Amino acid sequence: MLQSAQAGAVVLPVCDHYSGVEARMRKSLQLQAEMQQEFGVCVFDVTLDCEDGAPVGGEAEHAALVSELALGAAANARVAVRVHPVDHPSFHADIASIVGKAGHRLCHVMLPKVETVADIEHAVRAIDQAGAPALAVHALIESPAAVHRAFDIAAHPRLQSLSFGLMDFVSAHAGAIPAHGMGALGQFSHPLVLRAKMEISSACHAHGKVPSHCVVTEFNDTQAMENAARRASQELGYTRMWSIHPAQIRPILAAMSPDDKDIETACAVLLAAQHAEWAPISHAGQLHDRASYRFFWQLLQRAQATGRKLPLEAQRFFV
Protein backbone atom coordinates (compact mmCIF):
# COMPACT_ATOMS: atom_id res chain seq x y z
CA MET A 1 0.00 0.00 0.00
CA LEU A 2 1.22 3.51 -0.81
CA GLN A 3 2.15 5.35 2.38
CA SER A 4 1.27 9.04 2.56
CA ALA A 5 4.13 11.38 3.33
CA GLN A 6 3.92 13.51 6.44
CA ALA A 7 2.17 16.83 5.97
CA GLY A 8 4.74 19.59 5.74
CA ALA A 9 7.41 17.20 4.45
CA VAL A 10 8.16 19.60 1.57
CA VAL A 11 9.02 23.23 2.38
CA LEU A 12 8.99 25.71 -0.51
CA PRO A 13 9.03 29.51 -0.73
CA VAL A 14 5.50 30.80 -0.13
CA CYS A 15 5.44 32.75 -3.40
CA ASP A 16 5.83 31.45 -6.97
CA HIS A 17 6.34 34.37 -9.36
CA TYR A 18 5.58 33.90 -13.07
CA SER A 19 6.90 35.87 -16.02
CA GLY A 20 7.22 35.04 -19.70
CA VAL A 21 8.37 38.19 -21.49
CA GLU A 22 12.14 38.57 -21.74
CA ALA A 23 12.38 41.95 -20.01
CA ARG A 24 10.12 40.79 -17.18
CA MET A 25 11.95 37.49 -16.77
CA ARG A 26 15.24 39.33 -16.39
CA LYS A 27 13.71 41.80 -13.93
CA SER A 28 12.17 38.95 -11.93
CA LEU A 29 15.56 37.28 -11.50
CA GLN A 30 17.11 40.59 -10.48
CA LEU A 31 14.31 41.23 -7.97
CA GLN A 32 14.74 37.74 -6.53
CA ALA A 33 18.43 38.43 -5.89
CA GLU A 34 17.66 41.82 -4.31
CA MET A 35 14.98 40.44 -1.99
CA GLN A 36 17.17 37.47 -1.07
CA GLN A 37 19.79 39.92 0.13
CA GLU A 38 17.12 41.93 1.99
CA PHE A 39 15.52 38.96 3.77
CA GLY A 40 18.53 36.68 4.07
CA VAL A 41 16.66 33.83 2.37
CA CYS A 42 15.08 33.21 -1.03
CA VAL A 43 11.48 34.23 -0.42
CA PHE A 44 10.03 33.46 -3.85
CA ASP A 45 10.64 31.21 -6.81
CA VAL A 46 10.93 32.64 -10.32
CA THR A 47 9.11 30.50 -12.88
CA LEU A 48 10.02 31.30 -16.47
CA ASP A 49 6.92 30.70 -18.56
CA CYS A 50 6.88 28.90 -21.88
CA GLU A 51 3.18 28.04 -22.00
CA ASP A 52 1.86 31.62 -22.03
CA GLY A 53 5.18 33.35 -22.69
CA ALA A 54 6.18 31.77 -26.00
CA PRO A 55 4.67 33.35 -29.12
CA VAL A 56 2.98 30.94 -31.51
CA GLY A 57 5.64 29.80 -33.95
CA GLY A 58 8.42 31.04 -31.68
CA GLU A 59 8.39 28.24 -29.11
CA ALA A 60 11.90 26.99 -29.89
CA GLU A 61 13.44 30.46 -29.66
CA HIS A 62 11.63 31.11 -26.37
CA ALA A 63 12.83 27.82 -24.91
CA ALA A 64 16.40 28.71 -25.89
CA LEU A 65 16.00 32.07 -24.12
CA VAL A 66 14.68 30.38 -20.97
CA SER A 67 17.68 28.03 -20.98
CA GLU A 68 20.03 30.99 -21.30
CA LEU A 69 18.38 32.84 -18.42
CA ALA A 70 18.39 29.79 -16.15
CA LEU A 71 22.06 29.12 -16.87
CA GLY A 72 22.92 32.77 -16.23
CA ALA A 73 21.01 33.09 -12.95
CA ALA A 74 22.85 33.51 -9.66
CA ALA A 75 24.19 30.32 -8.12
CA ASN A 76 21.74 30.50 -5.21
CA ALA A 77 18.72 31.46 -7.34
CA ARG A 78 15.57 29.36 -7.38
CA VAL A 79 14.51 29.19 -11.02
CA ALA A 80 11.80 26.98 -12.48
CA VAL A 81 10.16 26.65 -15.87
CA ARG A 82 6.56 26.13 -16.96
CA VAL A 83 6.67 24.05 -20.11
CA HIS A 84 3.86 23.39 -22.58
CA PRO A 85 1.28 20.69 -21.70
CA VAL A 86 2.34 17.09 -22.29
CA ASP A 87 0.04 16.81 -25.33
CA HIS A 88 1.32 20.02 -26.96
CA PRO A 89 3.63 19.66 -29.99
CA SER A 90 6.31 21.71 -28.22
CA PHE A 91 6.38 19.75 -24.95
CA HIS A 92 9.24 17.39 -25.79
CA ALA A 93 11.21 20.18 -27.46
CA ASP A 94 10.81 22.31 -24.31
CA ILE A 95 12.14 19.47 -22.16
CA ALA A 96 15.05 18.71 -24.47
CA SER A 97 16.05 22.36 -24.86
CA ILE A 98 15.57 23.57 -21.28
CA VAL A 99 15.96 20.54 -19.03
CA GLY A 100 18.57 19.01 -21.32
CA LYS A 101 20.75 22.12 -21.11
CA ALA A 102 19.84 23.77 -17.81
CA GLY A 103 18.17 21.05 -15.75
CA HIS A 104 20.89 21.26 -13.10
CA ARG A 105 19.98 24.93 -12.51
CA LEU A 106 16.22 24.37 -12.16
CA CYS A 107 14.41 23.80 -8.87
CA HIS A 108 11.40 22.22 -10.61
CA VAL A 109 9.39 21.91 -13.82
CA MET A 110 5.77 23.09 -13.78
CA LEU A 111 3.42 20.92 -15.84
CA PRO A 112 0.24 22.71 -16.95
CA LYS A 113 -3.15 21.13 -17.67
CA VAL A 114 -2.40 17.84 -15.95
CA GLU A 115 -5.41 15.53 -16.15
CA THR A 116 -4.16 12.15 -14.91
CA VAL A 117 -1.28 10.38 -13.19
CA ALA A 118 -0.30 9.17 -16.66
CA ASP A 119 0.48 12.79 -17.61
CA ILE A 120 2.91 13.01 -14.70
CA GLU A 121 4.51 9.72 -15.67
CA HIS A 122 4.88 10.88 -19.28
CA ALA A 123 6.58 14.09 -18.18
CA VAL A 124 8.86 12.35 -15.68
CA ARG A 125 10.08 9.94 -18.36
CA ALA A 126 10.89 12.86 -20.67
CA ILE A 127 12.70 14.74 -17.87
CA ASP A 128 14.69 11.64 -16.94
CA GLN A 129 15.65 11.05 -20.57
CA ALA A 130 16.83 14.67 -20.77
CA GLY A 131 19.33 13.91 -18.01
CA ALA A 132 17.64 15.26 -14.87
CA PRO A 133 16.36 12.19 -12.97
CA ALA A 134 16.19 13.99 -9.62
CA LEU A 135 14.37 17.11 -10.86
CA ALA A 136 11.06 17.72 -9.07
CA VAL A 137 7.80 18.38 -10.89
CA HIS A 138 4.87 20.61 -9.99
CA ALA A 139 1.45 20.31 -11.63
CA LEU A 140 -1.45 22.58 -12.47
CA ILE A 141 -4.95 21.24 -11.86
CA GLU A 142 -7.23 23.12 -14.27
CA SER A 143 -10.34 21.02 -15.00
CA PRO A 144 -13.18 19.32 -13.09
CA ALA A 145 -11.86 15.88 -14.06
CA ALA A 146 -8.38 16.72 -12.81
CA VAL A 147 -9.83 17.91 -9.49
CA HIS A 148 -11.55 14.52 -9.22
CA ARG A 149 -8.15 12.83 -9.57
CA ALA A 150 -6.22 15.27 -7.36
CA PHE A 151 -5.47 12.73 -4.61
CA ASP A 152 -4.01 10.24 -7.08
CA ILE A 153 -1.94 12.92 -8.78
CA ALA A 154 -0.66 14.30 -5.47
CA ALA A 155 0.55 10.83 -4.48
CA HIS A 156 3.18 10.69 -7.24
CA PRO A 157 6.65 10.57 -5.60
CA ARG A 158 8.27 13.09 -7.97
CA LEU A 159 5.54 15.68 -7.40
CA GLN A 160 6.29 18.46 -4.91
CA SER A 161 3.31 20.76 -5.34
CA LEU A 162 -0.13 21.11 -6.90
CA SER A 163 -1.42 24.48 -8.12
CA PHE A 164 -5.01 25.42 -8.88
CA GLY A 165 -5.58 26.92 -12.34
CA LEU A 166 -8.54 29.18 -11.64
CA MET A 167 -9.11 30.73 -15.06
CA ASP A 168 -9.08 27.48 -17.01
CA PHE A 169 -11.15 25.74 -14.34
CA VAL A 170 -13.90 28.36 -14.60
CA SER A 171 -13.85 28.41 -18.40
CA ALA A 172 -14.03 24.58 -18.44
CA HIS A 173 -17.58 24.89 -17.09
CA ALA A 174 -18.90 26.47 -20.32
CA GLY A 175 -20.50 29.44 -18.59
CA ALA A 176 -21.98 27.49 -15.68
CA ILE A 177 -19.72 29.46 -13.34
CA PRO A 178 -20.19 33.24 -13.81
CA ALA A 179 -17.28 35.55 -14.56
CA HIS A 180 -17.13 36.84 -10.99
CA GLY A 181 -15.91 33.35 -10.01
CA MET A 182 -12.53 34.39 -11.44
CA GLY A 183 -12.32 37.56 -9.35
CA ALA A 184 -10.57 38.21 -6.05
CA LEU A 185 -13.84 37.92 -4.12
CA GLY A 186 -15.90 35.54 -6.25
CA GLN A 187 -13.27 32.80 -6.22
CA PHE A 188 -13.81 32.49 -2.46
CA SER A 189 -17.60 32.37 -2.61
CA HIS A 190 -18.65 30.26 -5.60
CA PRO A 191 -19.26 26.71 -4.32
CA LEU A 192 -17.70 24.87 -7.27
CA VAL A 193 -14.52 26.96 -7.17
CA LEU A 194 -14.29 26.69 -3.40
CA ARG A 195 -14.78 22.92 -3.52
CA ALA A 196 -11.99 22.54 -6.09
CA LYS A 197 -9.60 24.56 -3.95
CA MET A 198 -10.40 22.48 -0.89
CA GLU A 199 -9.93 19.18 -2.76
CA ILE A 200 -6.51 20.24 -4.04
CA SER A 201 -5.37 21.51 -0.65
CA SER A 202 -6.58 18.35 1.09
CA ALA A 203 -4.91 16.11 -1.52
CA CYS A 204 -1.60 17.87 -1.00
CA HIS A 205 -1.69 17.66 2.77
CA ALA A 206 -2.67 13.99 2.59
CA HIS A 207 0.53 13.23 0.67
CA GLY A 208 3.00 15.71 2.17
CA LYS A 209 2.95 18.05 -0.85
CA VAL A 210 2.60 21.84 -1.09
CA PRO A 211 -0.76 23.32 -2.17
CA SER A 212 -0.20 26.47 -4.25
CA HIS A 213 -3.07 28.93 -4.57
CA CYS A 214 -4.17 30.48 -7.84
CA VAL A 215 -3.70 33.94 -9.26
CA VAL A 216 -5.44 37.17 -8.38
CA THR A 217 -5.86 39.05 -11.65
CA GLU A 218 -6.47 42.43 -10.00
CA PHE A 219 -2.72 42.96 -9.78
CA ASN A 220 -2.95 46.70 -9.01
CA ASP A 221 -5.08 46.07 -5.91
CA THR A 222 -2.53 45.07 -3.28
CA GLN A 223 -5.19 44.93 -0.54
CA ALA A 224 -7.27 42.46 -2.54
CA MET A 225 -4.11 40.45 -3.12
CA GLU A 226 -3.20 40.33 0.56
CA ASN A 227 -6.77 39.50 1.58
CA ALA A 228 -6.90 36.63 -0.93
CA ALA A 229 -3.55 35.27 0.22
CA ARG A 230 -4.60 35.45 3.87
CA ARG A 231 -7.89 33.65 3.18
CA ALA A 232 -6.11 31.02 1.09
CA SER A 233 -3.69 30.42 3.95
CA GLN A 234 -5.94 30.64 6.99
CA GLU A 235 -9.20 29.24 5.62
CA LEU A 236 -8.15 26.78 2.90
CA GLY A 237 -4.76 25.51 4.03
CA TYR A 238 -2.63 26.83 1.16
CA THR A 239 1.03 27.42 1.98
CA ARG A 240 2.11 28.93 -1.33
CA MET A 241 0.59 31.28 -3.91
CA TRP A 242 1.15 32.48 -7.45
CA SER A 243 2.27 36.00 -8.29
CA ILE A 244 1.86 37.41 -11.79
CA HIS A 245 3.14 40.92 -11.03
CA PRO A 246 6.05 42.10 -8.85
CA ALA A 247 3.61 44.19 -6.77
CA GLN A 248 1.95 40.96 -5.59
CA ILE A 249 5.05 39.38 -4.04
CA ARG A 250 5.24 41.37 -0.80
CA PRO A 251 1.49 41.11 -0.05
CA ILE A 252 1.77 37.32 -0.41
CA LEU A 253 4.75 37.27 1.95
CA ALA A 254 2.93 39.44 4.48
CA ALA A 255 -0.22 37.32 4.40
CA MET A 256 1.52 33.94 4.56
CA SER A 257 4.10 34.82 7.22
CA PRO A 258 3.36 34.01 10.86
CA ASP A 259 2.82 37.09 13.01
CA ASP A 260 5.05 38.11 15.91
CA LYS A 261 2.74 36.69 18.57
CA ASP A 262 2.61 33.27 16.91
CA ILE A 263 6.39 33.21 16.50
CA GLU A 264 6.85 34.13 20.17
CA THR A 265 4.48 31.36 21.27
CA ALA A 266 6.15 28.79 19.01
CA CYS A 267 9.58 29.64 20.38
CA ALA A 268 8.43 29.47 23.99
CA VAL A 269 6.69 26.12 23.55
CA LEU A 270 9.55 24.49 21.63
CA LEU A 271 12.22 25.71 24.04
CA ALA A 272 10.22 24.45 27.00
CA ALA A 273 9.63 21.14 25.24
CA GLN A 274 13.31 20.78 24.48
CA HIS A 275 14.12 21.42 28.14
CA ALA A 276 11.61 18.68 29.07
CA GLU A 277 13.26 16.32 26.53
CA TRP A 278 10.08 16.48 24.40
CA ALA A 279 7.80 15.11 27.08
CA PRO A 280 4.34 16.75 27.42
CA ILE A 281 4.41 20.21 29.02
CA SER A 282 2.01 22.85 30.26
CA HIS A 283 2.40 26.34 28.77
CA ALA A 284 0.11 29.31 29.48
CA GLY A 285 -2.51 26.96 30.87
CA GLN A 286 -2.51 24.62 27.87
CA LEU A 287 -1.21 21.08 27.47
CA HIS A 288 1.29 20.52 24.65
CA ASP A 289 2.77 17.30 23.33
CA ARG A 290 4.50 16.08 20.19
CA ALA A 291 1.56 16.93 17.96
CA SER A 292 1.66 20.59 18.92
CA TYR A 293 5.47 20.56 18.89
CA ARG A 294 5.29 19.51 15.24
CA PHE A 295 2.79 22.31 14.53
CA PHE A 296 4.98 24.98 16.13
CA TRP A 297 8.12 23.67 14.42
CA GLN A 298 6.38 23.98 11.05
CA LEU A 299 5.32 27.50 12.00
CA LEU A 300 8.95 28.42 12.69
CA GLN A 301 9.99 26.85 9.39
CA ARG A 302 7.49 29.08 7.60
CA ALA A 303 8.70 32.12 9.51
CA GLN A 304 12.29 31.38 8.56
CA ALA A 305 11.34 30.73 4.92
CA THR A 306 9.54 34.09 4.69
CA GLY A 307 12.46 36.04 6.09
CA ARG A 308 10.94 36.80 9.48
CA LYS A 309 13.46 37.65 12.18
CA LEU A 310 13.47 34.97 14.85
CA PRO A 311 14.43 35.47 18.50
CA LEU A 312 18.09 34.61 19.17
CA GLU A 313 17.22 31.59 21.27
CA ALA A 314 15.19 30.10 18.38
CA GLN A 315 17.77 30.75 15.67
CA ARG A 316 19.81 27.81 16.89
CA PHE A 317 17.11 25.47 15.58
CA PHE A 318 18.22 26.42 12.05
CA VAL A 319 21.99 26.19 12.51
Image (cartoon, rainbow, N blue to C red):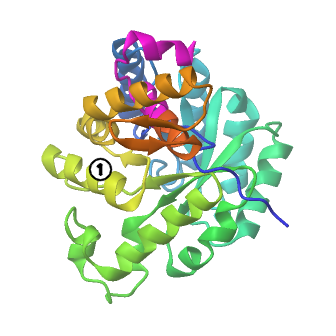
Is residue 145 in view?
yes
Which residue does the image show at 78% across and 61% down from the upper left?
Answer: 122
- In front of the other: 27 or 305: 305
Q: What span is in magenta?
A: 299-319
Magenta: main secondary structure: helix
Expressed as whole percent of the image width and height from the top left, the position of residue 77 reads 53, 22
Q: Tell me if residue 16 comes above or below residue 149 in the rendering.
A: above
Which residue does the image show at 41% across and 31% down from the upper left?
Answer: 266
If the image is split into quadrants, where does the N terminus sit? bottom right
- In front of the other: 240 or 271: 271
If the image is split into quadrants, where does the C terminus sit? top right
Which residue does the image show at 72% across and 58% down from the upper left?
Answer: 4
| 209 relative position to 49: left or right | right
- In front of the other: 86 or 255: 255
Expressed as whole percent of the image width and height from the top left, the position of residue 41 reads 45, 19
User: Would you identify the image quadrant in which residue 14 lies?
Assistant: top left
Which residue matches tag 1? 229
Confirm whether the magenta stretch covers residue 306.
yes
| 269 relative position to 233: left or right | right
Query: Which secondary structure lies at badge 1?
Result: helix
Is residue 20 in view?
no
Amino acid tagged 1: Ala
Confirm whether the magenta stretch covers residue 69.
no
Expressed as whole percent of the image width and height from the top left, the position of residue 73 reads 54, 20
- In front of the other: 98 or 241: 241
